[in-house]
Image (spheres, rainbow, N blue to C red):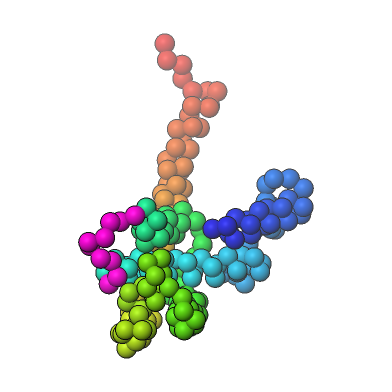
Amino acid sequence: MVTSLILAIRHYRSTRRVTGDDTPSATTETSFDDGAARWQHKLAWVLFNMAASLALAVTLGYWITDYNPSHVISADNLIKHGINAVVIIVDVVVVATPVRLLHIWQPAVFLTYYAIFTVVYWASGGTNEAGAPYIYSTINYTDAPGSAVVYLLFGFLTSLPFTHVIVFVVYKLRVLLLTSRRSRAPAQEATAAPLADIKDSPERPQIP
């Protein structure tokens, strides 16, 4: 979010230098699909793809496999494994960033990096907040290395594709809703135009 804000401010300032005012001109409009996107747009798009799919995957994985019902749900835990997913869904609905199924390789690359990080973190003696030698109990290389590998593979082959499809479906529903609203607008304007002409006509009959 912070990176996107910085990139948005940078784009706004560069656009203002080109146009000389606060209104972007048609020549400075950028599309994600026509190959004209600047590097900051592409970077924000990649970060968005990573965050969207992985946030949902982490949330689902935690509540399904790692959460212990006997533990009290803290505010920190709820933010990390709940609110983040809600923010992502809202972001997909509100922001005009496109989602492509083939871009699943981007969160997959980050997940690969994270899997390597968990091994390095464990091998260097890293612990979680409770002092246990793992970040999540499902990725416990000390007591159950086989289960940890299976869990990570499950995330690669099942959880990540599933959440990426969810993000894609939400995006397509937003596009469908927007397209539907835009298609109805010309029809409403065409219906309102004759009434406006009659109202503005100087020759309309006066009602006594």
Q: In this view of the protein, which residue sits in the foreground, 9 or 20?
A: 9
- Residue 68 on the magenta span: yes
Q: In this view of the protein, which residue sits in the foreground, 188 or 161?
A: 161
Quarter of the image with the C terminus in it: top left
Quarter of the image with the N terminus in it: bottom right
Report the predominant secondary structure element of the magenta stretch.
loop
- Which residue of the protein is positioned furthest toward the bottom in this rendering? 146
Residue 22 in view in this figure:
yes
Residue 120: percent from left, percent from top: 49, 82
Residue 178: percent from left, percent from top: 43, 54
Residue 39: percent from left, percent from top: 66, 69
Q: In this view of the protein, which residue sits in the foreground, 159 or 20?
A: 159
Name the side, left or right, on which 148 lies relative to 114. left
- Which residue of the protein is positioned furthest toward the top in this rendering? 208
Name the side, left or right, on which 184 lies relative to 70. right
Question: In the image, is residue 63 above or below residue 24?
Answer: below
Give the magenta-colored segment's residue range.
65-74
Question: In the image, is residue 107 above or below residue 68?
Answer: below
Residue 175 in view in this figure:
no
Residue 121: percent from left, percent from top: 48, 78
Where residue 80 sits, quadrant-wise, is bottom left
- Residue 47 on the magenta span: no
Question: In the image, is residue 181 above or below residue 62?
Answer: above
Query: Residue at the spot x=73%, y=50% of the render?
Result: 16
Name the side, left or right, on which 194 lies relative to 147. right
Query: Residue at the spot x=66%, y=53% of the render?
Result: 9
Query: Residue at the spot x=36%, y=79% of the render?
Result: 139
Q: In this view of the protein, which residue sits in the foreground, 72 or 168?
A: 72
Query: Residue at the spot x=34%, y=55% of the render?
Result: 74
